[in-house]
Amino acid sequence: MPKMSKTRRQRKGGNPVRGTGNASQPRTKHIEQQVASLQPQRPSAPNLFLSPSVPRPESLIFPAMVALGCWGMVIYFLFLSSEANHVLFGGMAALIALIWSVRFGIRVRKLLQQRSRT
């Protein structure tokens, strides 16, 4: 008799055990309930990445300074620079300045909302 590999022997002979998967469902539901009860319940918070927290007005100084500095670079590159690509550099600085200005505006709005609640 030729030698068979273990996988062929298992496939060829016998009674293969094939479950439908229904037997373990009550156990998994029980485990999911236990895990859910162990995890601390936190209230759902808004997306913190898009709206950073503003604990006090001093946290507005840095974004305001960066935004103003970027707008100054826009003015410099567009009107005062003799660089060949001054419009390209001015446009890139304007995009960065716009991003920082929006971030600053979001922080100011959030601070005003926190003050109106208290």
Image (spheres, rainbow, N blue to C red):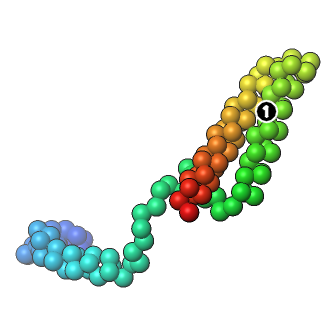
Residue 74 occupies quadrant:
top right
Q: In this view, does 106 lie to the left or right of 1?
A: right
x%, y% of residue 63?
Answer: 74, 48
At which x and y percent is residue 10?
17, 73
Question: Which SS class for mark 1?
Answer: helix
As drawn, which residue projects farthest toward the left?
A: 15
Query: 86 or 24: which is nearer to us?
Result: 86
Q: Name the quarter where the C terminus is drawn.
A: bottom right
Q: What residue type is labelled 1?
A: Trp
Q: In this view, does 7 lie above or below 88?
A: below
Residue 49 in view (yes/no)? no
- Res. 37 image quadrant: bottom left
**Is 40 displayed left or right of 13 in the figure?**
right
Q: Nearer the viewer, residue 105 or 31?
A: 105
Whether residue 97 can be seen here: yes
Residue 110 point in image, percent of width and height: 58, 52
Category of crowding for the residue at label 1, using alpha-carbon neighbours closer than 10 angstroms: few (below 14), some (14–19), many (at least 20): many
Residue named by callout 1: 71
The quarter of the rendered structure image containing the N terminus is bottom left
The total number of labels drawn is 1
Front-most of residues 72 and 91:
72
Along the line of sight, which residue is nearer the eye, 81 or 52? Answer: 52
